[in-house]
Image (cartoon, coloured by chain):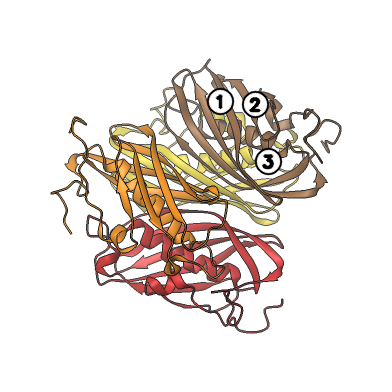
Chain colours: A brown, B yellow, C red, D orange
Amino acid sequence: MPDTQPFAFELDPYMRHLGFAAEVPAPGSARVWGVLRPEHLNSTGSAHGGFLFSLADSAFALASNSHGALAVALSAHIEYFKTTRAGERIEAHAREVSLTRRTGVYQVEIRADAGLIAQFTGTVYRRPDQPTPLQAGNSAA
Amino acid sequence: MPDTQPFAFELDPYMRHLGFAAEVPAPGSARVWGVLRPEHLNSTGSAHGGFLFSLADSAFALASNSHGALAVALSAHIEYFKTTRAGERIEAHAREVSLTRRTGVYQVEIRADAGLIAQFTGTVYRRPDQPTPLQAGNSAA
Amino acid sequence: MPDTQPFAFELDPYMRHLGFAAEVPAPGSARVWGVLRPEHLNSTGSAHGGFLFSLADSAFALASNSHGALAVALSAHIEYFKTTRAGERIEAHAREVSLTRRTGVYQVEIRADAGLIAQFTGTVYRRPDQPTPLQAGNSAA
Amino acid sequence: MPDTQPFAFELDPYMRHLGFAAEVPAPGSARVWGVLRPEHLNSTGSAHGGFLFSLADSAFALASNSHGALAVALSAHIEYFKTTRAGERIEAHAREVSLTRRTGVYQVEIRADAGLIAQFTGTVYRRPDQPTPLQAGNSAA
């Protein structure tokens, strides 16, 4: 599955549910963004950790599947730096740090008005012979 | 802030948005559960990684704030083991692994029909003199 | 490569350099221990984080390779809880949390005089058709 | 404890035991390097994961303590990308990703002949009123 075509992807149901938009500028890379709504907040009035993780995880999923083969997440971690407020635009930018036939590692920066507010790292196991369901036309959903 | 009273908490807006329910059986512990809806799925038809993390992160927040003082998440990681299907009840159970005046570490098991489907570990920084907003009556939301 | 025989392993050069001893009580499990020497300390007089990680990582390597197939570490993390002093016996106990044909996740508890002093989690990619070099007789060293 | 002076540090006993050398080019940053000796290898003939972690952890310790206040490691994780061979010079470069009065997060790149072979992320809790023992003249060792 060569990277000769732009990756025409479909947002999955959860990304749509949280109001995310996305682009895949090049294989191995992705940007996902959304506006922080009141229902995305924790009890201190800042973005819930699960919301920030979900944004970053979506960028990780798009970047790791953008070569056309199925990439299955094995693990991920996140570090939180700064708080946010309702109404801010939050953006996650994933880049590929390592890629082998069977594995990949992606680093995601999460930015808002205050700059870098969190960072995420994710590891996938790749199935080189199985097409990704994120590609337009492949979805099982 | 001694642990002499049951911890009467309020779900935060994001937990309510994802349809979670919760209990705090004892200080340092929490259970959060929800039903996996179609809007919580990824493109393979399994729970989105962000949904599973959000469930575990909510249990982590309740457990770490259940001593009455504000606990701020510094970092977390998750490992994924098994897939799920729409309609399953997913439950996260957080327990305290370490607690000092200023820090705490929590381990969360995430279970569904197939048993243990993921595990989560989170670290907090504690502010012993600041009350948690998760306690009923304290919320800023 | 069935688990019908006890796993007869060899310590690798780094485990020997740090003075570790080990046992594999059952497939998927391992214990590694050592005495904390002055050269293993950090500048506060406690075990260096790298020493504790090395002990846990060795238990992780033995447990994940104990099925006979090569297991390659993809990622690991560690949380630190308590300090130690020179002369203490430190022990790491690894257990298998998840095992599939291609992947495995292991949790390691690190104990000393004060009880649980750190915990470690590691993820491997498995090569089912390649024998582990940790098995006695296979070593490349 | 202002950053007006160069940080004159001392290697701790474990760094010396593994043959590391180090520099702190600026507050919040550190480089640590060493030559991969036969006693640093695992059973495949590559650097042991514990050795690579120890190198990165040492850079993390120097960078996080270089502001003069004591920084205590709470957690760390590492992702492995490529193998190495005895005789290679391995270098870890730590940079500060986040710094608050009480916390800090550091990212460490680990490089050898093949380029980026692993990456590390570490989180500290800071004690602003307690001087670091890594500063020359403060050591408890």
Amino acid tagged 2: Leu
Labels 2 and 3 in the same subunit: no
Instruction: Answer whether residue C25 is visible to the viewer in this image.
Output: yes
Q: Which mark is residue A40?
A: 1
Asked where in the image residue B54 lies, by quadrant, the reply is top right
Report the residue at 61% width, 23% height from top. A33
Q: Distance between the residues labelled 3 and 1?
A: 19 Å
In the image, residue B22 lies at what x, y percent? 54, 41
Q: Is residue D138 above or below residue D96?
A: below
Q: Determine which residue is flagged by label 2.
A: A18
Labels 3 and 1 in the same subunit: no
Residue with the most extreme top position: A87
Q: Which of marks 2 and 1 is nearer the N terminus?
A: 2
Q: Determine which residue is flagged by label 3.
A: B35
Of circles 3 and 1, the one toward us is 1
In the image, residue B71 lies at what x, y percent? 37, 38
> Is disc 2 in contact with disc 1, using a CB cutoff of under 8 Å?
yes
Labels 2 and 1 in the same subunit: yes
Q: How far apart are marks 2 and 3 (CA)?
A: 17 Å
Amino acid tagged 3: Val
Left or right for D44, reference C112: right
Q: In this view, does D26 lie above or below D60?
A: above
> Is disc 3 in contact with disc 1, using a CB cutoff of under 8 Å?
no
Q: Is mark 2 on a helix, strand or loop?
A: loop
Report the residue at 42% width, 49% height from top. D91
Q: Which chain carries label 3?
A: B
In the image, residue D110 lies at what x, y percent? 46, 48
Q: Is residue A46 above or below residue C47?
A: above
Q: Could you say which is closer to the camera, residue D38 or residue A42?
A: D38
